[in-house]
Amino acid sequence: MEGQTSKDKLNEVQVKVDELHSVMQQNLNSAIQNMDNLQELENKTENLMNDTAEFNKKSNTLRCKMCLHNYRAGICIFIGIALLITLVVVVSIKK
């Protein structure tokens, strides 16, 4: 009788060990999956940082080009108004 209870206890311990082994295996698989996800996230973050740097560089270049364009447009408008005033003055003087 005592041998049977020892065998039952041994089987019970073995079942618990098997359950623990299964849980540990699942935890290891989850940890590996998390590492893969983390690596993928790091890669995406690095790509996003590179894209951000490129966007900043291009936006600064575009801003400078637009400032120059606006400056040139202002000069052209000023010259046009100055020529128009000069024309009006010259025409009024000749009359």
Image: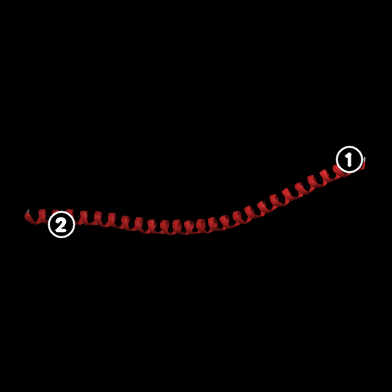
For residue 92, side relative to residue 12 (left or right): right
Closer to the camera in the image, 86 or 37:
86
Residue 91 point in image, percent of width and height: 89, 42
**Residue linked to disc 1:** 92
Mark carried by residue 47: none
Mark nearer the N terminus (1 vs 2): 2
Q: Position of residue 74 (x, y in %)?
A: 72, 48
User: Is label 2 in a helix, a strand or a loop?
Assistant: helix
Residue 70 image point, x, y percent: 69, 49
Q: Which residue is at the front of the view, 78 or 45?
A: 78
Amino acid at dot 1: Ser
Q: Give the number of marks.
A: 2
Question: Residue at the spot x=60%, y=55% of the render?
Answer: 60
Q: How was this image coloured?
A: secondary structure
Question: Residue visible at 9% across and 57% down?
Answer: 3
Q: Quadrant of the C terminus?
A: top right
Measuring 74% from the left and 50% from the top, which residue is drawn there? 75
The residue nearer to you, when weighing 82 against 25, is 82
Res. 34 image quadrant = bottom left
* Separation of marks 1 and 2 at Cα, in angstroms: 120 Å
Residue 4 position by quadrant: bottom left
Write down the residue under mark 2. 10
Image spot of residue 30 (x, y percent): 35, 55
Secondary structure at numbered mark 1:
helix
The amino acid type, in three-letter code, at marker 2 is Leu
**Foreground label between 1 and 2:** 1
Image point (54%, 58%), residue name: 53
Position above or below: 85 against 48:
above
**Residue occupying the far right of the picture:** 95
Density class for disc 2 (Cα within 10 Å; few <14, some 14-19, many ≥20) is: few
Q: Nearer the viewer, residue 69 or 86?
A: 86
